Image (tube, rainbow, N blue to C red):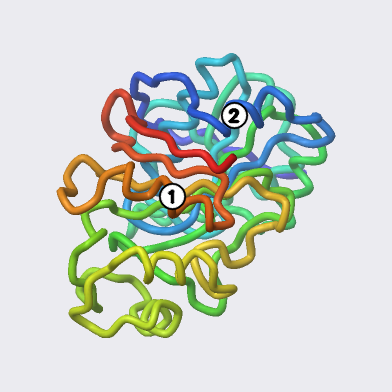
Amino acid sequence: MTMTTALNTQIPVRSCATIPEPLRRLCDTHPGGHAMVISIVGAGGKTSCLFWLAQAFSQLGKKVMITTTTHMFLPREGFPVILACHPVRLPDAVTNRGSFACYTGWNPLNNKVRGFSSADINALAEQNAVDVILAEADGARGFGIKAPAEHEPCIPDYSDCVIAVTDGRLLGAPVGPDNVHRWSHFSAVTGLNSGDTLDLGAISRLIRHPQGMWKSAPPDALRIWLINRFSQNENFSPDILADWLRGTPLNAVWFGAVREDPAITHILQRQ
């Protein structure tokens, strides 16, 4: 029997605008063979993005499970938080209650929760016990951008969408080990040296490289680049990226700040 425990904590809830395209279209057209799975990777706002999407889907009447394939800080308030040994064996009393967060353990010393394996999340998706599974699938230790190490990210195979987050304040700014997570990997993928400017050429290499931003993403998954805190950047504008997007494998670029309302202020889509 799998034990489940409800923690006396909840996830932050914010007001939300409509889920932006093309994720909204995916939500409307998802075939339903399994729960829709959205994985969030990168750096500079993954957790805030996770909570914002959870609230937005909940406002659409979707039953959402929030989790991680790595570790994250225990959320403070909002949706109920459940601890369970295995998500597939969650009782109906949990999965029928509406949106919730679920993890396999909690370490009170560092206040971090531990999530489930990618295989566990795939199995839960097959059960269709919830409508949407939101999984934080990467770690960044508070940095604004990263390239994954050999063991990262941990993206479930059933992911219908992979959202990569970047702190927009770093675009057009000098980068190095002080503001980039996994600097040695990042430097090898982008070709940048410490102190070089993070330009579109380097971003293109990070996006396209097999060890870059979308490493381990399922080939058919929707790929969205979320440039968070974009309003605080004076070096770039959405217009600069319009032509650039056509030459990338991305489906869309979102500009905004997921802690604000509206969370997304501009959207570019590849036709």
Which image quarter is the N terminus in? top right
Q: Nearer the viewer, mark 2 or mark 1?
A: 1
Residue type marked 2: Val
Mark carried by residue 64: 2
Q: Tell me which residue sits at (40%, 48%) in the image.
A: 46
On screen, 171 above or below 148?
above
Horizontal placement of 98 versus 81: left or right?
right
Residue 133 sits in quarter: top right
Residue 121 visible in the shown view: no
Where does the image place residue 76, in percent across and percent down from the top left?
A: 33, 36
Q: Residue furthest right?
A: 33
Which image quarter is the C terminus in? top right
On screen, 248 above or below 233?
below
The residue nearer to you, when weighing 56 against 214, is 214
The residue nearer to you, when weighing 27 against 69, is 27
Label 1 sits on a secondary structure element that is helix
Residue 14 sits in quarter: top left
Q: Tell me which residue sits at (29%, 60%) in the image.
A: 144
Proximity of marks 2 and 1: CB atoms separated by less than 8 Å? no
Where does the image place residue 205, in percent across and percent down from the top left?
A: 46, 71
Q: Tell me which residue sits at (33%, 71%) in the image.
A: 181
Residue 218 visible in the shown view: yes
Where does the image place residue 6, in percent across and percent down from the top left?
A: 52, 33
Label 2 crowd bin: few (<14), some (14–19), many (20+), radius 10 Å? many
The residue nearer to you, when weighing 10 against 206, is 206
Residue type marked 1: Asp
Residue 131 sits in quarter: top right
The residue nearer to you, when weighing 262 against 86, is 262
Q: Residue furthest front?
A: 243
Q: Which residue is mark 1?
A: 243
Where does the image place residue 268, in percent across and percent down from the top left?
A: 45, 39
